[in-house]
């Protein structure tokens, strides 16, 4: 098995782009989101030679716009989808205990027994949390990693979520799930781990056409078109998969979050779990972040028509999220307090359901008529299993020789850099340099939007841009 540096940067990209054009990879992966980098890692860990191409930057699409939860599938339990919930709990266990414990922490999730939460919703939520704990036990996740759910008093509920309206509050139910510090960071870390096993990670290379034995591609920086050859190809482009595989019908669903200042909600230490009005299976979450913010989400809206590179939240979704939150807090949060908003597109497989909310979150792995494999659907928590299934199919249909997946026991790389925080950017100069030298950032937007999350708040973005731009330019020059 190849042992290489885990560093991703512009110099390595230039070198490996030349090599990829002259070589025949065992596996060509198309798509640099969590599923694509997961496929690259799975294949590389089996000893296969791997090239991954991404039209933009790593984590450019849906993967950076999640709720950042590594969850055990409470919603799937509520809808009776036990298989998906069990798979989620198992993959959560692997992520929190073996694969990425350095990237994930336990997060308390509080279902408040407020007047806006009906008795039926309280009972269903409490039952779901109890069943979720049973899945935790089945997955053998220790209580030291995820504590048991429990009923809490009104006093404890207010300590965990100070913004709750205390009037007629009757405590609540507290359970625990996993929370990523940063979903884009998970993508980058998986990609770097794959690179350390010899995978070529090539951003800004767009696939124009896929075949079973390669792809026609275009290098975005120069416009040059050329062929990449491979013994197998995996289409992991998410909501854009149908553009490369005509046999797939993708039904994008937009999930929107808003960004609030944590101080506007009393700096909560647990997430609020708020049922949709009239529902026992759909929730809005107010999730505290490590950056002094709270993200509130999410929605589930059909997105007909052309698929944009980056989805835009609608005002109606923002209003819905605020209304849901304001049902349980004492002081309503106003529209002008929303500091930012973002939206991602779920890559759902069209099953003909009336609402995208009813579409299964199970993933699909299939072979296109042209001979390549397409992997679609699923969710961030189960990316590893999706990748394993995709590589298994590619190995089988293309006649490759490879051992079984070993990613269930493979720990992702981890790094620590100095925290000399720059006054203008709110992050350290070392962190920006690390993003360019080690995490493959090539532009200021790569740093603002995907190596840090400064870009989620436009005012923060504008304040930081010039300082980040200077450091990025210096770091890129040092690589030439």
Image (cartoon, grey):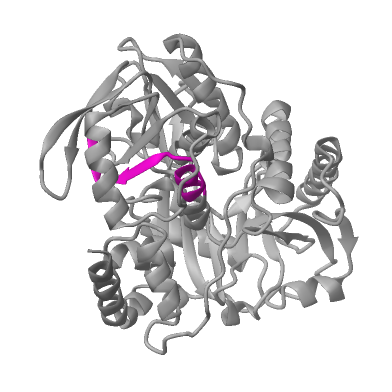
Q: Is residue 215 magenta?
A: no
Decide which of 439, 83 is in the foreground and name it. Answer: 439
Decide which of 197, 288 is in the foreground and name it. Answer: 197
Considering only vertical position in the picture, is 138 above or below 271? above
Q: Is residue 201 magenta?
A: yes
Considering only vertical position in the picture, is 219 above or below 44? below
Q: Magenta part of the protein: which range?
A: 190-207
Residue 155, percent across and down?
86, 76
In the shown orientation, is residue 434 left or right of residue 18? right
Task: Identify the residue at image location x=15%, y=50%.
Answer: 221
Task: Identify the residue at image location x=27%, y=35%.
Answer: 20
Task: Identify the residue at image location x=43%, y=67%.
Answer: 452
User: What quarter of the picture does the C terminus occupy?
Assistant: bottom left
Considering only vertical position in the picture, is 342 above or below 354? below
Task: Identify the residue at image location x=23%, y=70%.
Answer: 477
Which image quadrant for residue 446?
A: bottom left
């Amino acid at each position: 098995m190849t042992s290489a540096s885990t560093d991703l940067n512009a110099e390595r990209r230039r070198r490996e782009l030349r090599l990829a054009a002259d070589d025949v990879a065992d596996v060509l992966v198309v798509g640099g989101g969590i599923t694509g980098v997961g496929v690259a890692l799975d294949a590389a860990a089996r000893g296969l030679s791997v090239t991954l191409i991404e039209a933009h930057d790593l984590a450019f699409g849906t993967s950076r716009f999640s709720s950042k939860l590594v969850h055990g599938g409470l919603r799937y339990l509520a809808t009776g989808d036990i298989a998906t919930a069990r798979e989620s709990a198992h993959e959560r266990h692997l992520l929190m205990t073996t694969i990425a414990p350095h990237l994930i922490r336990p997060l308390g999730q509080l279902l408040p027994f407020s007047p806006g939460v009906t008795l039926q919703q309280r009972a269903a939520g409490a039952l779901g949390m109890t069943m979720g704990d049973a899945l935790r036990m089945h997955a053998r996740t220790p209580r030291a990693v995820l504590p048991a759910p429990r009923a809490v008093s009104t006093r404890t509920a207010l300590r965990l979520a100070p913004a709750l309206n205390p009037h007629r509050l009757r405590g609540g139910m507290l359970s625990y799930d996993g929370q990523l510090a940063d979903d884009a960071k998970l993508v980058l870390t998986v990609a770097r781990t794959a690179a350390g096993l010899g995978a070529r990670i090539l951003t800004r290379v767009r696939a124009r056409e896929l075949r079973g034995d390669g792809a026609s591609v275009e290098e975005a920086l120069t416009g040059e078109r050329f062929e990449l050859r491979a013994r197998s190809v995996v289409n992991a482009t998410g909501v854009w998969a149908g553009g490369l595989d005509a046999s797939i019908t993708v039904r994008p669903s937009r999930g929107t979050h808003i960004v609030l200042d944590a101080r506007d909600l009393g700096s909560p230490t647990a997430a609020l779990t708020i049922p949709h009005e009239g529902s026992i299976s759909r929730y809005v979450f107010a999730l505290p972040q490590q950056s002094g913010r709270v993200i509130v989400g999410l929605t589930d809206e059909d997105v007909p028509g052309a698929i944009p590179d980056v989805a835009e939240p609608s005002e109606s979704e923002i209003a819905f999220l605020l209304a849901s939150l304001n049902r349980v807090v004492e002081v309503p949060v106003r529209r002008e307090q929303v500091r930012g908003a973002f939206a991602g597109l779920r890559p759902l497989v069209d099953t003909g359901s009336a609402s995208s909310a009813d579409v299964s979150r199970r993933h699909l792995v299939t072979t296109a008529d042209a001979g390549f494999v397409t992997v679609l659907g699923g969710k961030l928590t189960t990316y590893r299993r999706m990748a394993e299934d995709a590589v298994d199919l590619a190995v089988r249909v293309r006649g490759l020789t490879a051992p079984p997946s070993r990613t269930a026991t493979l720990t992702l790389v981890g790094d620590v850099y100095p925290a000399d925080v720059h006054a203008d950017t709110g992050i350290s100069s070392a962190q920006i340099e690390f993003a360019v030298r080690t995490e493959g950032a090539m532009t200021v937007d790569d740093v603002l939007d995907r190596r840090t999350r400064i870009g989620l708040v436009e005012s923060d973005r504008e304040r930081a841009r010039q300082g980040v731009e200077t450091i990025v330019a210096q770091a890129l020059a040092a690589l030439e």
